[in-house]
Structure formats: structure tokens, C-alpha cells
Image (tube, rainbow, N blue to C red):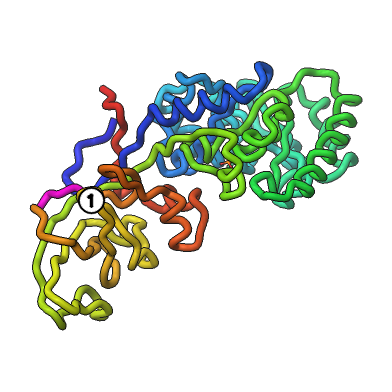
Amino acid sequence: MTDHFYRDTWVEVNLDAIAYNIEQMKEKLPESSNIIAVVKADGYGHGSVPVAKRALEAGANALAVALLEEALVLRKAGIEASILVLGRTPPEAAPVAADQDITLTFFQEEWLREVETYKLDKNLKVHMKWDTGMGRIGIRNQKELKQMLDALNENPSIYLTGVFTHFATADEEDLTYFYEQKERFDAFLAFFKEYWPYEVAIHIGNSAASIRLPEDMYDFIRFGISMYGLYPSGAVKAKGEIDLKQAFSLHSRLISVKRIAPGESVSYGATYTAKQCEWIGTIPIGYGDGWIRKLQGASVLVDGKRMPIVGRICMDQTMIQLDREYPIGTKVTLIGAQDGDVIDMDEIANYVDTINYEIPCIINNRVPRIYTPNQS
Ligand SMILES: *Cc1c(COP(=O)(O)O)cnc(C)c1O
């Protein structure tokens, strides 16, 4: 899958974990609810093409991305499954989407009117977004809905194949706001059905909503973070409603091992000074890879044991304190399991005060992704 690489730092993506997580989710869902695998942002940093292919094999029925560009990457890779773009695509790109059979999201009448002015060789499939409380994109009232349906009626080449909404608090302990959104959605849906007799796909749930309320998910779920084996929040994790396997791990190797004397310092600013004789190892990863400076002081695994990051993280290199001398080339695990211990994504996310979603996204594509089990 991956081009050859020389560097001693890599991400391993376990595609069997992706399949496992999809199977776990499928077991919770009723037969009538299918899975849209969300592979935006290059598959949350895992690699959209290999993840999409494995997700489809494992039983996902469709794909979703944020941008038309991301959908085109999937089509170029030969993926024929239906793909929904979740964000707003500029109207002038509609002919490209129609040509490639990519479904676009819309929520503005002007958008429909402008798309009409472009020549579409094939019908353009669209899903309508309803804002029931997220406050991001989507129509907000029945008047807009009616206008939109009128515009669609005048336009046989724009083909409504779905309607959807998105929850703001499905991952929180308190579901009051979630239920308010759900109520608004159901009212919208009743109104919609009065005016629109045709079949459309209905989908409302992200990972959190789907794990917690699998029976309420209509035709599809939009399965993102938990397909990668991560829990949408501590609250969802604590409930233990689904077993997930983290697909992403990050590894490097010792490229330098040295002994420093008491009083000697490490890295820019000399912020770390040894109190006694100690072993310092260098690994070739830094903030230029997305291994951000805030991770100073966090631990990595060497020989199954935790070793602290000492001194400032550089653009390309990071130093760690070792408990003894290790040979050059010794494997260092920064995220993932090694010999019985594990540093999971949540631990790293907590350390830098963010959510697990952000971590694989910020480990950028300077770090090669390899896929296991090995693929030809
Ligand atoms: C990213 C996204 C999802 C997936 O959410 P997860 O919490 O990762 O499951 C679903 N729907 C929309 C509209 C999104 O933008």
C-alpha cells in the first residue's frame, strides 16, 4: 500500500480493528440501519482509501467525507460505493460531483438555483441538511424546507436521495439537549413526508448517538471515530456499551543512545538537566510530524516500560530518558501497545488537553502509514 520509506518512524493502522469495530456496531444496530463509514480528513489520519476499502468489505454500505476533493481521492482509487460529501461544496463543482456520482449536501435555495445554471450530464444526487440544534449548517425551519422542496420539484436533474441532521451533545452524560434535537428532527420529518412522497435515506447519528441509541437511527448511521476504535467521549466509554479496538499506533526507533553526566542538559533552552548519570535516547519524530511540543514530559514505551520525554521536543527529533543502555534501532512505541503496556489515544489526548479525534489527524503525512495485516 505504502511507498517505500527510509525513516525510522511510522504509523501502523490495523485494518482488522476497523473491521472488528464495524462488526461490533452492526451487532447493536437493527437490520434496517446500515453503516456509512466516515473517512473525512484522510480517514481521521488513518488513510482514507485503505480504511474505506476495508470498511466496505466488513459491511459498511456507503462512505462519507467532508470535501469533494476527499471524495475524488476515493473514486480515483477505484472505489465505487456511494459517497456523501458532508460539507458545503461550491455550486460550480456540482458538474464534477454529478459526473463522478458523488452525493452532495445542500441547505440553501440559492445553492440549488445556482447549480441549475450549470450543465449536468448526469443527475446530481443530494442530501438535505437540517439544523436541529447544532448551529452549524442546515435549514432551520419548515418555511425553508418547503421552499427547498419546491425548488427541487422544478428541477428533475437534482435528485434528493437523503435528509439528515447532526447532534451536538450525543456524547455527553446528559442527553436532554439531544432529545430536544431529536424531537425537532421528528417534527421536520413529519412535515417533510407530507410534501415529499418519494423514498429518501434518513440518517441522524454519529458514533455516539449510534452506540447509545442504536434503535433510533433510521436508515443509516454515520460511523466515524468509533470505527477507528476510539470512544467519542469518556461518558460513552464509561458506559461500556460497545467493545472497540484502536486501529492506530505510532512507532519509532532509537537512533542515538548516550550517557550524560550530572549537570548536563538536553535540547533547546536546556530546560532539562540530569541530576545523576543517565541514559538519553533520541527518536526521529518531532513537531514537524505533528508530535507537538506540548507532549514534553509524556511517556513512550521502550522494552514495554514507560520512559519520559525530556527536554523540548524539536521539529524532527525528541529525546527520552532511558532506564539503561539500549541498542540503536530499539523500537519505541509512542501510541499503542508494546509488551504488555499500552499508551492509548485517550492518554495522549488528555495529556495535551484535547479529544482523541484530534491526535491521529495531527500526526501528518510526513509519517508513513503502514497497514496490517500486510496487504499486497
Ligand atoms: C464527522 C461527522 C460524523 C462522524 O462523527 P463521529 O463522532 O466521528 O462518529 C458524522 N456526521 C457528520 C455530519 C460529521 O461531520
* Residue 155 figure quarter: top right
Residue with the mark numbered 1 = 332
* Residue 103 figure quarter: top right
SS state under label 1: strand
Q: Which residue is more in the foreground, 64 or 322?
A: 322
Q: Is residue 236 left or right of residue 364?
A: right
79 versus 111 height, above or below: above
The amino acid type found where label 1 is placed reads: Val
The image position of residue 339, as x and y in percent, is: 25, 43
Q: Which residue is more in the foreground, 112 or 72?
A: 72
Q: Which residue is more in the foreground, 313 or 145?
A: 313
Asked whether 330 falls inside the magenta stretch, the response is yes
Dividing the image into four quarters, tell me where ligand 1 lies: top right
Q: Is residue 232 left or right of residue 20?
A: right
Report whether residue 68 is seen.
no
Quadrant of the image for the N terminus?
A: top left
Asked whether 153 falls inside the magenta stretch, the response is no
Write the residue at 68% across / 18% down: 32
Report whether residue 79 is seen.
yes
Write the residue at 65% across / 26% down: 220
Magenta range is: 328-332
* Magenta span: chief secondary structure: loop
The image position of residue 277, as x and y in percent, is: 12, 74
The image position of residue 121, as x and y in percent, is: 61, 22
Quadrant of the image for the C terminus?
A: top left
Q: Which residue is more in the foreground, 215 or 243?
A: 243
Furthest residue to the front?
340
Write the residue at 29% across / 56% down: 300
